[in-house]
Image (spheres, grey):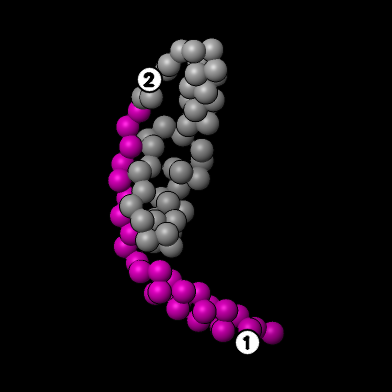
Amino acid sequence: GGMSQNPYFTQFLADVLERELLIATTAELTGSGTARLAAAAVGREVEARGESTTLLPKVPRRALAARFAEAVKVSRTWG
């Protein structure tokens, strides 16, 4: 979907999960997955197609948590 095409969100997700992500280059994975499930239900197989890119974590989760805690601390001083 749309969020998988958002570079900020996908990098944040990789960082928070501390995991490598495979990001599909097609945004219509829901439709593709539904078609594959429907085909499987009637005894057929539809080959998965498409490319993906690999995204690696860049910021340790501990550093993200520290930045978030600092942001919360600062926001509590707002008036």
Q: For residue 22, what is the image quadrant?
A: top left
Outermost residue toward the right? 79
Q: Is residue 78 magenta?
A: yes
Residue farthest bottom in this picture: 77
Q: Amino acid at mark 2?
A: Glu
* Viewer-closest of 40 and 26: 40
Disc 2 is placed on an element classified as: loop
Residue plotted at (45% across, 78% down):
66
Which residue is label 1 attached to? 77
Q: First in sequence: mark 1 or mark 2?
A: 2
Any magenta on residue 9? no
Q: How many marks?
A: 2
Q: Nearer the viewer, residue 15 or 19?
A: 19
Residue 33, can we see it? yes
Q: Position of residue 64 (x, y in %)?
A: 43, 71
How far from the left and from the top, in percent, is residue 46? 42, 17
| Rendered-image quadrant of the C terminus | bottom right
Q: Residue at x 33, y 59 (%)?
A: 57
Over which residues does the magenta segment extend?
50-79
Q: Is residue 72 left or right of residue 21?
A: right
Picture residue at 48% right of the left edge, 25% below the top: 32
The tag on residue 47 is 2
- Looking at the rendered image, the disc whose residue lies closer to the viewer, 1 or 2, is 2
Secondary element type, mark 1? loop
Image position, residue 28 (x, y; %): 49, 30
What is the quadrant of residue 59 in the picture? bottom left
At horizontal 48% and vertical 22% (from top left) the residue drawn is 36
Evaluate whether residue 8 shows in this view.
no
Q: CA distance from mark 1 to mark 2?
A: 55 Å
Identified by mark 1, the residue type is Thr
